[in-house]
Amino acid sequence: MKILGIELNKPSFNEVTASAIMAAGLWLACVALWRVSEQPMDRVEAGGALLVIFWACVGVRMGIRFDKGLRHVAANMLCAGVILAVYHAIASILV
């Protein structure tokens, strides 16, 4: 499968699990930094941050890396934007 001409890899279960653990740790660090700065995130912002961080961790396992060029950056931003748009559409309906 390709996105913007980038050949994607299929990550194994162990790679997705490692990505999820890394994303959880990075998300906790992000939330802690926001809290220390005395501007804590609300639930919707924290959920969006978790989704984008998780996508970034899984995207690297799929072969989308920021250091590989502009197409990789565009693919990462496109996917993160779609994920956030869907998330905020659902959050606006439920909240």
Image (cartoon, rainbow, N blue to C red):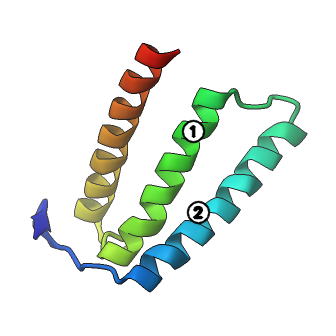
Mark 2, Cα crowd under 10 Å, few <14 / some 14-19 / many 20+, is many
Is 15 displayed left or right of 85 in the figure? right
Residue depicted at x 44% and y 74%: 16
Using the rendered view, name the quadrant where residue 2 is placed: bottom left
In the rendered image, the vertical position of residue 54 relative to residue 31, given as above or below: below
From this view, report whether residue 52 is shown above or below residue 59: above
Q: Residue at x 54, y 78 (%)?
A: 18
Checking the image for residue 47, the label placed there is 1
Of 4 and 19, nearer the camera is: 19
Amino acid, disc 2: Ala
Q: Residues within 10 Å of mark 1 (few under 14, many from 20)?
A: some
Instruction: Please state the horizontal and vertical placement of residue 13, each as a whole percent of the image.
Output: 40, 81
Q: Quadrant of residue 66?
A: bottom left
Q: In the rendered view, would you say 78 is above or below 2?
A: above
Q: Is 50 situated left or right of 77 in this image?
A: right
Query: How far across and how far down the image is residue 6, in percent?
Result: 16, 70
Question: Which residue is the site of mark 2?
Answer: 23
User: Residue sitting at 34 percent across and 40 percent down?
Assistant: 81
Residue 9 in the figure: left or right of residue 95: left
Residue at position x 28%, y 64% in the image? 72
Judged from the image, the secondary structure of the residue bearing numbered disc 1 is helix
- Left or right position of 35 against 53: right
Residue 56 position, x and y percent, is: 45, 61
Report how far apart the C-alphas of labels 2 and 1 lie in the structure: 12 Å
Which of the pair 6/11 is nearer the observer?
A: 11
**Residue 66 in view of the camera:** no
Tag 2, which secondary structure?
A: helix
